[in-house]
Structures are given as C-alpha cells and as structure tokens.
Amino acid sequence: MINDLIPGPDLLSRYTDRLLVFFEDYVPRVLSALIVLFIGLYVIRIVNRLVRRVMVKRDLDPTLSRFFADILLWALRILLFVTFISKLGVETSSFVAILGAAGLAVGLSLQGSLSNFAGGMLIIMFKPFRVGDTIEAQGVTGTVLEIQIFVTKLVTGNNQTIFVPNGALSNGTIINFSMGGTRRAELLFSIAYDADLKLVKDLIYSILEQNTRVLKDPAPAVVVTELLDNAVRLAIRPWAKNEDYGLMVSEVLERIKTALHDAGIDTQPFVKEASKK
C-alpha cells in the first residue's frame, strides 16, 4: 500500500523535466524583466534630473517646473511598469483594459479631487498669483506659501495656515494685492463741521510728505468723500510698496491722530482702513 503512494521513477522524471522546462522558459524572462526594471529606474532618475536642470536654467516658475517634472516622472514609471510586465509574459492589452476600468471607477469617485487637480493646472498655467503674493480669495486673505496640485497653501497675518482647494480657487474671484508691486491705502476718518478743512488737509499732506514709506509717485491724495449728519468724512489715499504697506498705514494713522489732537481739531469716533491688509 505504501509503495503505491510513492511516485515511480517515470513520474519523478516527468516532474523534473517539466520543472526544467519551466525554469528554462521563465527564468530568462524574469532576469530580462528585472534588468529592464533596474536600468529603467536608473534612466528615469537621470532624465528627471536633466529635465529639472533644464527648467531651472530656462528660469521657469518653480511650481510649474516641479509639477511638470513630477508628471513626467510618473508617466515614465507607468511606461516602465507596463514594459516590465510585458517582459514577464503578461498580456498588456488586458492589463491596460483593467487599468482603464479602474481609472474610470476612481475618477467617478474622486470628482472633487479631479476638479481640484484641474484647478491647480489652470492656476499654474495662467498664474493669477505666485508664491509670495498676498491674495484674497474664498473669504480668506493671506500670503501664498505653496501652490500644490490639489490645494493652495496660504499663511495669514496672525500665522494661521489655510489650505484652499484649487477647484474653488480657480473658479472664484481672486484679489492679488502683490501683482502691481505697489498698493494704495484708503484711510477713512471723520472731522467735525466746525474744523478748518484746509488746515486739516495741510497737516495730513505734511505727514504724508515726511513719511519715507509713502511714495511720491503716484502722489497721495486727501479728499472729502461724504457729508454726514454730524461730520465730514475724509479719505486719505497714500501709496506704498507692498512690503511697506502695513507699517505705512499704521504710521500714518498714528501721526495724523497725534497731529489733529495737538492742533485742537475734533475727530468723530469713526476710523476705518478700507483696504484689507
């Protein structure tokens, strides 16, 4: 009975022959596929470095350079993977069909993410703002830290980090305070009707002229904007460079308040900075 369970010499020989045939057939495929894989990874790394260097030499936008370099990297990796499995003997046509079906399913389930991806592409291509610009969009104001594929990273004046989805950002209104290089403030305050308007304007112009952060060109302006029930509302419109804007507004408001107080001019309890920082 036991002897019946033990394979005979002929059966062992057939198994051995089949195993040898298997190794002879598939080992060269595996070896060639591994060689293609390692060489392909090395070549992809070199190509990626070369592409990044070329983009840097051509002075392309850093975000755009990194984005296109990453797209090229993953495209080459996918191509290498398809070549690798093809070397192993896997039918690539059926594999590509499976990938297509999986991609469709993933695309339907990630419509919001794809919208953000498309928004990121539009932002990178049309450049409504760059890294370092101060913008207002989607109800928030901040300085752009990074433009990623799906979100844009902002930091506010009180050091809060905000991630704004690129889909909503690209489809909404964007106010870029940095694109022009300079900004005009609109400082509103009110004085009593019995105040000497000419004296008030002369004091304000003197303060603006003495402030080194206020630009001479375009020239600042002081105008009457509204006659209220109990006060005259003035608008002070000085210009400053983007980097000096916040300090300029603070200095001008403080010095005007002090100068009017020293001159005995009454101001009404209304002070407002119309342009957001």
Image (spheres, rainbow, N blue to C red):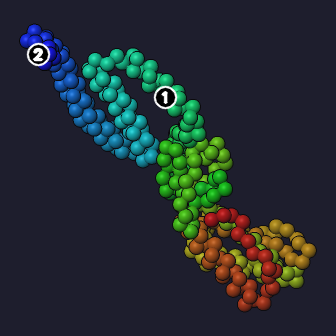
Q: Amino acid at mark 1?
A: Gly
Neighbor class of circle 1 (other Cα within 10 Å; few <14, some 14-19, many 20+) is few
Residue nearest the viewer, comparing 152 with 29 = 29
Residue 44 image point, x, y percent = 29, 34
| Residue beneath disc 2 | 3
Q: Position of residue 112 (x, y in %)?
A: 59, 39
Q: How many numbered discs, if any?
A: 2
Q: Nearer the viewer, residue 237 or 4?
A: 4
**Residue 182 relative to residue 73: left or right:** right
Q: Quadrant of residue 52?
A: top left
Q: Residue at 66% across / 46% down in the picture?
A: 172
- Residue 139 position, x and y percent, is 67, 56
The answer to whether one can see residue 202 in this image is: yes
> Label 1: which residue?
103
The earlier-in-sequence mark between 1 and 2 is 2
Labelled disc at residue 173: none
Element at label 1? helix
List x then y, in percent, for residue 146.
48, 53
Q: Does the rendering let one see residue 209?
A: no
Give me the residue at 34% from left, 16% from top: 91
Q: Identify the residue at image location x=62%, y=77%.
A: 251
Left or right of 225? Residue 86 is left
